[in-house]
Image (tube, helix red, strand yellow):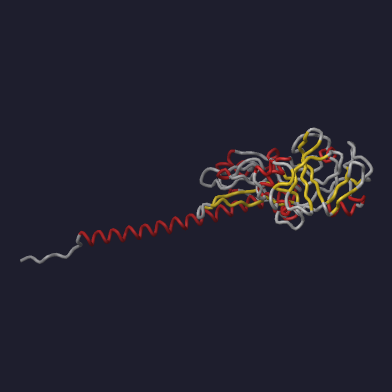
Amino acid sequence: MRKATSGFTIVELLVVISIIGILSTISTTSYLSIKTSARDSERSSKIDIVAEALEKYYDKNGEYPSCANMTKSANVVSTSLGNMNPEVLKSPSAATGTNSISSCINLAAGIDAIAYVGDGSTACLTGQSCPKWSLQYSEESTGSIITVNSRRRNIGIDWIAIGTQVWAKANLNAGTMIAGATEQTKNSILEKYCYNNLESNCTTYGGLYQWDEAMQYVTTQGAQGMCPAGSHIPSDNDWKILEVQLGMSQAQADATGWRGTDQGTQLKSGGSSGLNMPLAGFRTSLGSFFDLSSYTHLWSSSESLSTAWLRWLNSGYTTVNRTTGDKTVGYPVRCLGN
């Protein structure tokens, strides 16, 4: 009689195959997790390289590069940022070949497409908007879009990012002080009023400007006016964008008079927005000064017939007043980055 030979039954074979499948799945999952983590780390490192390059450019030139003065190369889109030397941006004209970089670097497609240096007008990754001179990369492990603002010097000292905008952290204080009784005129001198004709008040509260002087005698919405290069006098719509970002509904922002909830509190000194807008008072059309520590009005670059739109904050209100003002009155200006 023949002895039965030992071997795997069909059930045992299926169990072994199942175990192998489970082990394979675990190994694959672990490998993908490690690969994803490595990709995230690589993307973060490359963003740091671009950020460093931008800061070195700023250190040398006192400003961030514009699209116009950078060499744009198709290679930038198709090659890894790993080849970039942080020194490249120190001399834009010398940036050529695979190391060239556009100030509008768009790497939103492809394996190493991880970043966008925003010019303030174009969406970054996945349709999200970003402030001027910000960079974004996708983090695979969480699915998040990480934003790194390269305006670290300006945001830390003079500017602050709020949503999609970059605002000056203080009222404009530019120009030579003239007496409140004197009209600001179109000449070769940038002129400002200081409350009660004291320069120290300009240092604390910013200058006061008639609309035409603030706009430097143009009427274009969003004009640079007396604001520094790379910024402009906010339009009425720019103010609305800020207000909506601080919690107003669009309907409230579009209304006139006192509107919103606590946006005025957020904007005033000590408020959560970080803009710390002081109640700077104003210079009347007759040349006298009123309402320091009680009111402030801030110009927009948008006209309304013979007047201009402005924003009005009051010590007794938590809301923001959208109204128009006489262009000959002296009000503060808060600049907005382009």
Q: Does residue 55 show up?
A: no
Is 101 left, or right, of 256 in this rendering?
left
Kindly indicate the quadrant of the structure image that contains residue 44: bottom right
Q: Does residue 241 show up?
A: yes
The number of numbered badges drawn on the structure is 0
**Residue 77 x %, y %:** 57, 41
Is 144 left, or right, of 154 in this rendering?
left
**Residue 303 x %, y %:** 77, 35
**Residue farthest to the top?**
305
**Residue farthest to the left?**
1
**In front here: 333 or 8?**
333
Q: Quadrant of the C terminus?
A: top right
Q: Residue at x 79, y 38 (%)?
A: 308
**Residue 290 x %, y %:** 88, 49
Is 76 left, or right, of 202 in this rendering?
left
**In front here: 115 or 93?**
115
**Residue 125 x %, y %:** 57, 45
Q: Quadrant of the N terminus?
A: bottom left
